Image (spheres, helix red, strand yellow):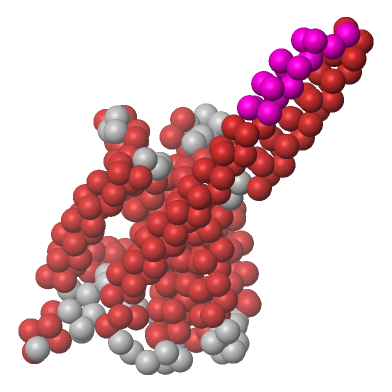
Amino acid sequence: MDFFEKYFFSGYNIFNTLVYGILLIIAIFILIQFFKKIDKRPEKLIVAVIPFILMGSITRALVDNGIFEYSWFLITPGIYYIIGGLTIISLLLGLLIEKKIFNKINKTNKEIIETNNIKKNIKKNLKNNLENKLKNNIKKSFKTKIRKNIKNKIDYRLIIFSLGLLGLIYVSINIHQLNFKVIVEVLLIWLILTGIFYILGKKIKIYRDKYNLSIISAHLLDATTTFIAVDFYGYIEQHVLPNLIYSEFSTATSIYPLKIIVISLAIYSIDKYIDDKTIKGLLKLAIFILGLAPAIRNLFTMAIGIQ
């Protein structure tokens, strides 16, 4: 027990950082097989999983500020397992609901087509003017029913987003105060930087893709929250490597070039050298989460904790 207390429950160190990295690689490998089995593109879940990311990050911020009791399940990496598990369950539930509704729509459409085939045979025996009239009415009826069926189809991502939103609301009711000055400071800088990369996307190919831009934007938010927290509000960086870099340059602004270079190279390498769409999509989704999750945690830790 002393071993775990020393190396896993006493902040970040080189040992637990390596262990968490290995666990992440194993998790990604398992998820690759999972997404291939369900035949879905992981990067298309970026918007759908945002409520879950917010829920986990705000929960961590509430622990940081003593509102939630300190527990291994509510800190890294425990919170990632909990939120990841809930997300997978929501995904499976969403796929199940979508499949049931899709099958129902297909059955209804087949019935409509069969009915129309019978009507077509009847029409052959009618006079030309009556036949044309029936033909137009049948077409109109068929198209109307198809449109209604399509509108009634539920996308599995909507189920994931909705369930995550319920969890987010449940967690957020525990927030009793927020420092909006901090939130505005962070969001203003983040929006300006994201806007710059949006403009760069017109010239630089990797930033033109909406998923790549989302990843860069998430990490710019993480860098901005770190910069504001460390340089202006006296917070201390907990991660080993960034802390060494900040100490060397005496400012957390050094996180910006580090993030931009590393993430841009990662995105470029994924796009250029990985052909498998599932692996490519899952790596991008993982990098997006690794940027947005700590960013939201930092933001709400400050917004809740700073009076």
Our reading of the magenta stretch's main secondary structure is helix
Seen from the viewer's position, the closer of residues 211 and 232 is 211
Tell how many labels: 0
Observer-nearest of 99 and 256: 99
Residue 147 lies left or right of residue 58; in this view the side is right
307 relative to 91, above or below: below
Q: Quadrant of residue 18?
A: bottom left
Quarter-of-image position of residue 24: bottom left
Specify whether 291 is left or right of 266: right
For the magenta stretch, what is the residue range?
A: 113-127
Most extreme residue toward the top is: 128
Residue 13: name its quadrant. Answer: bottom left
Q: Residue at x 40, y 41 (%)?
A: 41
Q: Position of residue 255 (x, y in %)?
A: 37, 59
In the rendered image, residue 187 lying in the magenta stretch gets the answer no
Position in image of residue 298 (x %, y %): 44, 73
What residue lies at 40% left-to-right and 78% top-to-bottom?
A: 60
Above-or-below relation of 107 to 24: above
Residue 124 falls within the magenta-colored stretch? yes
Q: Can the viewer see residue 99?
A: yes
Q: Quadrant of the N terminus?
A: bottom left
User: Percent position (x, y) of residue 59?
Assistant: 44, 79
Residue in the picture at 80% in, 10% down: 125
In the rendered image, the residue lying farthest to the right is 129
Horizontal arrangement in the rendering, residue 125 relative to residue 42 (left or right): right
